[in-house]
């Protein structure tokens, strides 16, 4: 079970790669890195889409991640089906996203760039407290069985859940890439991201684009939340804490508002974290690696790793 | 009595922090979500100097100010290179990294922090709660006076110009880079001062005392009171500092209330309660005008 221990999210002890020699750390690290990267990509993509349109940094997106996990585990207890749980979590979170943007974010857009960020921190804090009060402060188990077998790749165990995470991530990311690049909806998104006023003048309903944007962004975060909860068999109120801020670092590295750059940055950070933790044994905890990387990279390339606009061909 | 003094000192420390953040975020309009890192830097400086080198409280304070300000120079230089949103996230990152350093680098005492920081003394008289409170009040008044002075100087005017429109400010000959760096240095140095004082007051520093949530609290106070004004920073620190003490029964829902308060504040009253042109201030101004003119000429009221 090296695999599960290594790819841990915050708030739970991160196990070092103990008991594994130098030679056999590579493949497990790769597996973990890709799994983590996929989860980061799912979460960061929604955030990046939102930034692309509204230019707001939405910390509350991680509230959808936790909400997805809680709704998921509740529905799972009722139905016993992991995929119904996944869909329900995504649906409820999407609704939350829609309500938030309609009643809070859109009305305060004109009030300065930092104001929405502060509001989103307020929303996130309130959401986490609400989860704690409703579901209790303890860890809830999420013992879902996924219909994928546990594999061994080159002698390394890969769990069915990890496999599922990667598959869902690939499907969702390819789907998003297709929608953005090849549909009217995607065209409207890109036009609005590039210049909202001109897009509006061309007959694109910016309100609608923004609404869909949040629906999708929050649903993606919730999917990530459900999958992570199944992977670690745990749902708890503060599970969104570290993802909330780490995702900001990732979308900055990806060149704010650039979906493809965001996906690349997610995989990069997932892999770097895992390999640094496995080989170098970084002085600082694994969760601060993303921020150290962020600060170093921004000093060298102030515009981010991947410059904006790669998707808007 | 002790209880009131302890609350009073804590509120005063947060008032200094809100005022210090106000120089960066309020006057200069720069996003800074990591002020707790500099608060912590000052606290750890004072803690290490006093417990390991026997430096006195009175020298610790300037040292804490200096160290935080020096690191503030780095942040100031970074701020020149980054666009606004990038900077906001970088400051969050700095806060997380700083706490991780406090926690994992043995020099800073690890997760347990640094205990047994001595109380200050004047001529053999060791500080009691009352002395701490009075010192804190003096510090608040000094920092507020400095802020008030800044507002009236060319420096304050330049920062406001940068906040409104950086390019226009540069076009009229304002040295944008040096003024921005100066704002960061001043703001972070004052947070360091607050930290140095707080370390001696608490007699122990731990990494968690300076985490990102503390930065959010400082920012909440400033936004709640009124970004860009001295009275706003003070009112925010006092109200949000005392609120949880008064409403003990909501202690379980404290963060929930904080979150909603912040949200509804920026949604409906982004100027803050007593900020520039806020509902309350307009009301008071109107009332004052009505009183002055005897209510005869309503059309001039509020102007």
Image (spheres, rainbow, N blue to C red):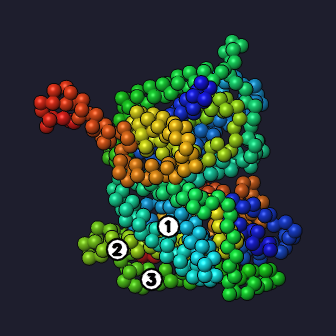
Q: Is residue A106 visible?
A: yes
Give the distance between the C-alpha atoms of the residues marked 3 and 1, in whole angstroms.
17 Å
Where does the image place residue B137, in percent across and percent down from the top left? Answer: 52, 24
Q: Residue at x 50, y 48 (%)?
A: B258
Q: Image check: A262 left or right of A179?
A: right
Secondary element type, mark 2: helix
Q: Nearer the viewer, residue B253 or A26?
A: B253
Q: Which residue is mark 1?
A: A47
Secondary element type, mark 3: helix
Q: Earlier in the sequence, mark 3 or mark 1?
A: 1
Q: Residues within 10 Å of mark 1 (few under 14, many from 20)?
A: many
Where does the image place residue B1, in percent across and percent down from the top left? Answer: 59, 24
Q: Earlier in the sequence, mark 2 or mark 3?
A: 3
Q: Which residue is mark 2?
A: A208
Q: Residue furthest left?
A: B296
Q: Which residue is mark 3?
A: A179
Secondary element type, mark 1: helix
Q: Is residue B167 above or below residue B199?
A: below
């Amino acid at each position: 079970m090296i695999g599960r221990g290594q790819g841990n999210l915050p708030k739970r002890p991160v196990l070092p790669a103990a008991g594994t020699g130098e030679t056999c750390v590579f493949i497990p690290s790769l597996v973990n890195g890709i799994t983590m990267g996929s989860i980061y990509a799912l979460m960061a993509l929604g955030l990046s889409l939102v930034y692309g349109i509204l230019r707001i940094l939405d910390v509350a997106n991680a509230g959808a991640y936790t909400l997805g996990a809680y709704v998921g585990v509740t529905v799972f207890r009722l139905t016993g089906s992991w995929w119904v749980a996944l869909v329900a979590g995504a649906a409820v979170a999407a609704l939350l996203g829609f309500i938030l943007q309609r009643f809070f974010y859109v009305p305060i857009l004109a009030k300065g760039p930092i104001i929405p960020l502060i509001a989103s921190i307020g929303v996130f804090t309130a959401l986490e407290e609400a989860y704690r009060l409703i579901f209790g402060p303890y860890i809830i188990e999420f013992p879902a069985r996924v219909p994928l077998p546990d594999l061994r790749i080159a002698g390394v165990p890969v769990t069915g859940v990890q496999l599922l995470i990667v598959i869902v991530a690939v499907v969702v990311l390819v789907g998003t890439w297709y929608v953005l690049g090849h549909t009217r909806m995607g065209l409207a998104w890109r036009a609005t991201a590039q210049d909202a006023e001109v897009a509006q003048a061309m007959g694109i309903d910016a309100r609608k684009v923004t609404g869909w944007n949040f629906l999708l962004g929050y649903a993606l975060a919730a999917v990530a939340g459900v999958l992570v909860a199944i992977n670690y068999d745990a749902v708890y109120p503060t599970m969104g804490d570290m993802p909330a801020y780490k995702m900001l670092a990732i979308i900055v590295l990806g060149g704010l508002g650039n979906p493809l750059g965001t996906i690349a940055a997610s995989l990069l950070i997932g892999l770097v974290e895992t390999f640094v933790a496995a080989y170098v044994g970084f002085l600082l905890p694994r969760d601060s690696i993303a921020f150290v990387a962020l600060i170093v990279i921004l000093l060298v390339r102030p515009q981010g790793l991947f410059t904006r606009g790669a998707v808007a061909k | 009595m002790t209880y009131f003094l302890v609350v009073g000192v804590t509120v005063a420390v947060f008032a200094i922090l809100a005022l210090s953040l106000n120089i960066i975020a309020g006057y200069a309009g720069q996003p800074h979500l990591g002020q707790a890192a500099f608060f912590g830097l000052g606290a750890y400086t004072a803690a290490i100097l006093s417990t390991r080198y026997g430096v006195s409280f009175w020298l610790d304070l300037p040292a804490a100010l200096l160290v935080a300000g020096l690191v503030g120079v780095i942040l100031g230089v970074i701020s020149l290179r980054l666009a606004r949103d990038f900077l906001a996230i970088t400051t969050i990152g700095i806060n997380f990294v700083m706490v991780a350093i406090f926690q994992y680098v043995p020099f800073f005492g690890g997760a347990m922090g640094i205990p047994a920081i001595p109380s200050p003394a004047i001529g053999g008289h060791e500080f009691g709660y009352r002395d701490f409170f009075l010192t804190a009040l003096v510090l608040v008044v000094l920092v507020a006076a400095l802020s008030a002075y800044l507002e009236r100087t060319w420096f304050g005017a330049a920062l406001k110009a940068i906040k409104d429109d950086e390019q226009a400010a540069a076009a009229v000959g304002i040295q944008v880079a040096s003024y921005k760096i100066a704002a960061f240095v001043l703001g972070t140095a004052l947070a360091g001062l607050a930290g140095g004082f707080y370390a001696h007051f608490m007699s122990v520093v731990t990494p968690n005392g300076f985490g990102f949530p503390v930065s959010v609290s400082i920012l909440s106070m400033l936004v709640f009171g009124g970004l860009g004004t001295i009275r706003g920073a003070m009112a925010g620190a006092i109200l949000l500092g005392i609120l949880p003490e008064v409403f003990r029964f909501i202690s379980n829902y404290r963060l929930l209330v904080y979150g909603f308060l912040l949200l509804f504040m920026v949604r409906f009253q982004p100027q803050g309660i007593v900020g520039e042109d806020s509902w309350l201030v307009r009301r008071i101004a109107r009332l004052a005008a009505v009183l002055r003119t005897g209510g005869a000429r309503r059309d001039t009221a509020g102007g």
